Image: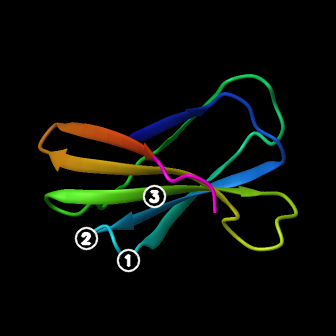
Amino acid sequence: MATWTTASELNADFFEVQRSKEGVEYESIGKVKAFGTTTLTQRYSFADTNPFDGVSYYRLRQVDFGSPKPFQTPAQLLLIKRQPESLSFLIRSLGTN
């Protein structure tokens, strides 16, 4: 299960979770509703019920209310290596576009 937190949010609508086998082309595998606007820390989670064998790459994008185009606000890239009973995470910032 992937989990993440936000320190604060402003007009956050939802998070889209995307998955890739090679880390290049991603497919959407789910959405998680965001809190919206808050200055309090929020915790979120998403379970991939059908991960790839070996390494799966996940991309998390925050989508804001009223955003003129989807995925205007980049969030984090999660690299997850699936092992029988554990997940290891490497979280890297994508920066701003």
**Mark 2 in CB contact with mark 1 (< 8 angstroms):** yes
Q: Secondary structure at mark 2?
A: loop
Q: Give the residue displayed 70% in from the left and 71% down from the top.
A: 70
Cα separation, mark 3 vs mark 2, equals 12 Å
Cα separation, mark 2 vs mark 1, equals 7 Å
Q: Give the residue displayed 76% in from the left and 38% down from the top.
A: 9
Q: Is residue 53 left or right of residue 50?
A: left
Q: Which residues are magenta?
A: 93-97
Quadrant containing the N terminus is: top left
Q: Which residue is mark 1?
A: 25
Residue farthest to the bottom, as pictured: 25
- Is residue 36 inside the magenta stretch? no
Q: Which residue is mark 2?
A: 22
Q: Which badge, 1 or 3, is on the more N-terminal residue? A: 1
Query: Residue 59 bears which disc, if any?
Result: 3
Counting from the top left corner in percent of width and height, residue 10 is at 82, 42
Counting from the top left corner in percent of width and height, residue 15 is at 62, 53
Counting from the top left corner in percent of width and height, residue 34 is at 70, 45
Q: Residues within 10 Å of mark 3 (few under 14, many from 20)?
A: many
Q: Secondary structure at mark 1?
A: loop
Q: Which badge, 3 or 2, is on the more N-terminal residue? A: 2
Q: Is residue 71 left or right of residue 69?
A: left
Tell me which amino acid carries mark 2.
Glu
Can you tell which quarter of the image residue 50 is in? bottom left
Q: Secondary structure at mark 3?
A: strand
| 35, 21: nearer the viewer | 21
Q: How many marks?
A: 3
Counting from the top left corner in percent of width and height, residue 57 is at 32, 59
Residue farthest to the right, as pictured: 66
Main SS of residues in magenta = loop
Query: Residue 15 bears which disc, if any?
Result: none
Cα separation, mark 1 vs mark 3, equals 10 Å
